Image (cartoon, helix red, strand yellow):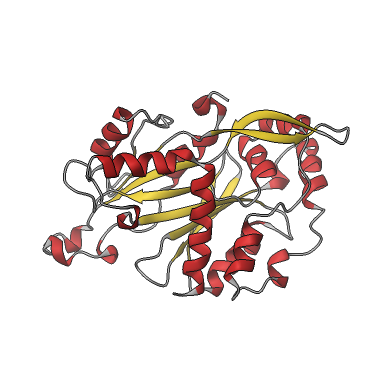
């Protein structure tokens, strides 16, 4: 098994521990005989959120995946949310795509910038540069360790008032934001986002309805949906050497359906591979998916 497999396995293991909806949905799929085991789920992509500051951000985190054979692909600009993003194509078809976004910190108010930099400045140099990228255990530990001190509740709230993305990252750091179940390869009756959404809601999970429960690209070749983020009890610095606990948004689960490109529509379904389907991402779809962690969706 390649090092990247171990890194991704570590991400998924900790993510499942923190996001009960993951096992909840997987168990529901097994109970309804959609799959026989979790190993049959194809992971379309995983996503990370970062702060756009010189020593961190997208250009830092991407080094891990570029080192392991991923290829940097299309850029995306989310003007209103002040975000930039790229997706990364995997070196093997059985690996998930990677989607990394970053907050353009310099576009926030001076007060919000100062709050963010009071934390991120604790990281003096790019931490990935000193990481042994061939050591899966070290990379896994890095992706799950705090990069800066625990934020105060007042700082979290102030950032959330201007950018809920900023407040999510200031607390969660590089924690995996979501993984994505590939829908089109599931059995009939579950192999479209429309039918899978019905299944998910019937089993008691809440879907993100920002932009509609189904997010559909203009060419109708990429259809996505997601649960709303799990609300977690988060311990904040109380400013007096102790902690105070508040409920905030954690991570969520996404679902993606990629349709066959027109030039390959003549191929038998048994011959269809990933390369024959819609690739990449759709900006407007992603813009709505981001809101899976927003208070308007979670109620936190």
Q: Nearer the viewer, residue 99 or 107?
A: 99
Q: Position of residue 215 (x, y in %)?
A: 36, 39
Q: Nearer the viewer, residue 223 or 20?
A: 20
Q: Position of residue 157 (x, y in %)?
A: 71, 29
Residue 208, picture quadrant: top left
- Looking at the image, can residue 127 be seen? yes
Q: Which residue sits furthest right?
A: 240
Report whether 244 appears left or right of 35: right
Q: Is residue 198 above or below residue 268?
A: above
Q: Quadrant of the N terminus?
A: bottom left
Q: Residue at x 64, y 35 (%)?
A: 163
Residue 248, picture quadrant: top right
Q: Quadrant of the C terminus?
A: top right
Q: Residue at x 83, y 34 (%)?
A: 242
Q: Nearer the viewer, residue 253 or 240?
A: 240
Q: Residue at x 68, y 71 (%)?
A: 131
Report whether 146 appears left or right of 260: right
Q: Position of residue 289 (x, y in %)?
A: 45, 40
Q: Is residue 121 above or below residue 239?
A: below
Q: Position of residue 204 (x, y in %)?
A: 36, 28
Residue 90, picture quadrant: bottom left
Q: How many numbered discs, if any? A: 0
Q: Is residue 161 above or below residue 186?
A: above
Q: Residue at x 27, y 34 (%)?
A: 199
Q: Is residue 16 above or below residue 212?
A: below
- Looking at the image, can residue 216 be seen? no
């Amino acid at each position: 098994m390649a090092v990247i497999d171990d890194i991704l396995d570590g991400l998924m293991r900790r993510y499942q521990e923190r996001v009960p909806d993951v096992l909840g949905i997987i168990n529901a799929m097994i109970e309804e005989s959609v799959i026989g085991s979790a190993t049959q789920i194809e992971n379309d992509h995983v996503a990370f959120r970062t702060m756009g500051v010189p020593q961190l951000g997208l250009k830092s985190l991407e080094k891990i995946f570029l080192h392991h054979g991923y290829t940097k692909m299309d850029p995306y600009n989310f003007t209103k949310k002040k975000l930039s993003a790229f997706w990364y194509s995997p070196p093997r078809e059985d690996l998930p795509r990677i989607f990394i976004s970053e907050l353009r910190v310099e576009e926030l108010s001076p007060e919000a910038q100062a709050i963010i930099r009071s934390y991120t400045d604790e990281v003096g140099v790019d931490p990935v540069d000193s990481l042994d990228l061939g050591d899966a255990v070290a990379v896994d530990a890095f992706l799950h360790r705090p990069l800066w001190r625990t934020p105060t509740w007042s700082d979290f709230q102030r950032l959330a008032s201007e950018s809920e993305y900023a407040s999510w990252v200031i607390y969660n750091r590089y924690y995996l934001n979501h993984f994505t179940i590939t829908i089109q390869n599931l059995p009939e009756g579950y192999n479209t986002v429309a039918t899978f959404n019905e299944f998910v809601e019937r089993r008691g999970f809440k879907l993100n309805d920002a932009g509609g429960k189904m997010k559909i690209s203009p060419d109708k070749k990429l259809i996505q949906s997601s649960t709303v983020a799990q609300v977690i009890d988060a311990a904040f610095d109380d400013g007096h050497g102790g902690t105070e606990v508040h409920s905030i948004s954690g991570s969520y689960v996404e679902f993606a359906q990629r349709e066959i490109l027109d030039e390959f529509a003549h191929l038998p379904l048994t011959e269809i591979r990933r390369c024959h389907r819609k690739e990449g991402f759709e900006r407007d779809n992603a813009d709505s998916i981001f809101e899976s962690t927003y208070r308007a969706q979670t109620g936190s």
